[in-house]
Image (cartoon, rainbow, N blue to C red):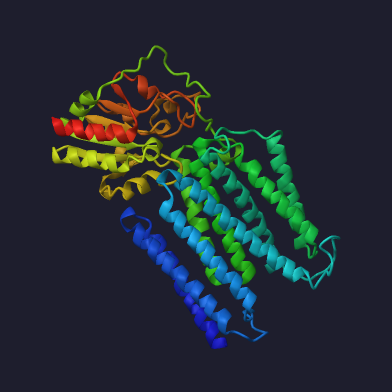
Amino acid sequence: MDLLESLVRIAWLIGAAGFVFGLMRMNSPATARNGNLISAGGMALAVGGTLVLLAVTTNPDSPHPGLPIAGWVIILAGIAFGGGLGLYTARTVKMTAMPQLVSLFNAVGGGAAALIAIDDYLRLAAPLCAGCIIPATQGIQGIPLEVSIPTVLDIVIGGITFTGSLLASGKLMGIISGKPIKVPGGQLVTAGLALIVAVAAIYLWAGNVSVPVLFVIIAASLIFGITMVLPIGGADMPVVISLLNSFTGTAVAMAGFVLGNDVLIIAGALVGASGAILTKLMADAMNRSVLNIMIGGFGGGEGTVSAGGPEGGTVRAIGMDDAAIQLAYATNVIIVPGYGLAVAQAQHAVRELAELLEKRGVNVSYAIHPVAGRMPGHMNVLLAEANVPYPQLREMDDINPEFERADVALVVGANDVTNPAARRAGTPVSGMPILDVDHAKSIIVIKRSMGRGYAGIDNELYVNPKTGMLFTDAKQGLADLVAAVKAL
């Protein structure tokens, strides 16, 4: 059996190498799909090796004893149900619902990792303190630190991720208000929960075996996830999702230490590290610190705050023919997509318009803000689904200097990321880097109404004398623009 276990560990390492290589391929939209397949192949190899080990090993002294029939039924039923549900969800989910789905995945990952640690602790504690599920038992030096430390960290991080991700998903779905919801004495409550967790963890790490104390840690962690995410507004959700994704990876890595499974450690560390890096990049794109976002977000929901901008501006509405003429006879056009594009499922329509303009000799590019939409990379994924050429997707720092040379900037459903109010102090978006749409020679904004974005303030771009508002649904409006350009 030693040879078999060695072969399985080699399979785990090959699978882990697949994770690393796949993650590298995901660095570019052009190779991301291939990278995802490579990572999935690595996971399939790792899971397959583990199942082989469980099927063959019968030595009771082995760290991987054979499973009884009931165990196999549970495993196979879980794979069938979870895999089937995942396949159905992946094939039916709308792009507008992708952020909510990512949050649910984070919740499932964090919760599963926490359950692994809970089960392992209960298994180790049972022979050391029989009947101690109700009364605490002190002074039993039975669970070594190398097991108890990752166990507690796994439960804490996994518990926070579970409830925090469910709450974030609820905010994105509209089940819970997207506005910041203040918890009475919120910071004191959160600090108190953190103190409870710290004291309970130290108690267990001191060598004490106590299931009730473990339950205290579980309860405090679950509540902590709620008090952490509830006060954060909708505009900060992309960063929150990325942070919780990092938490999920870290919890999985801790589960790997609990089980002594190398592939879980490597996979979790990769997800945790990449999520942390992405969170830092997202926060930098908003010119804010992650701590500042966690303490309180600026996202306040629709129509809650006044921007306090220059008064006296008027909104200028334009017709479809006027917009079509501007686009058809331009030399350079920059398209600025936002969440409204995703809501209207208009990614294919905007690609069709861009292709039509290119046939007329117009140079077309897309300006992608790091936090446009509701999750990291939302616009990239949306436009990639419509087969928009990758070189046309330009990041904020790269495209901003081009706006001054753009004849027309076409804004489709983007709001806060184009608001010039960010350049002034005293507004909810002050200091947030934005796309310099107002530097273009002419601006066309496709929007259904004058509704505000997640930051809850008016967009000063809409009263810019260069801006023409095309009030229509994004998908229908883009289709009408295609027809109008063709008619010229």
Nearer to me, 86 or 325: 86
Residue at left offset 35%, top offset 59%:
33
> In the displayed structure, does residue 225 sit left or right of residue 380?
right
Q: Quadrant of the C terminus?
A: top left
Q: Is residue 388 above or below residue 316?
A: below
Residue 225 x, y percent position in the rendering: 64, 46
- Figure label count: 0
Q: Quadrant of the N terminus?
A: bottom right
**Residue 304, above or below 136:** above
Q: At 21% from the left edge and 29% from the top edge, which residue is drawn?
A: 407
Q: Is residue 438 left or right of residue 450?
A: left
Q: Position of residue 41 (x, y in %)?
A: 42, 69
Looking at the image, which is closer to me, 96 or 409?
96
Task: Evaluate whether residue 215 shows in this view.
Answer: yes
- Residue 362 sits in quarter: top left
Q: Which residue corresponds to the image point at 48% horizontal and 62% vertical from the top-left? A: 84
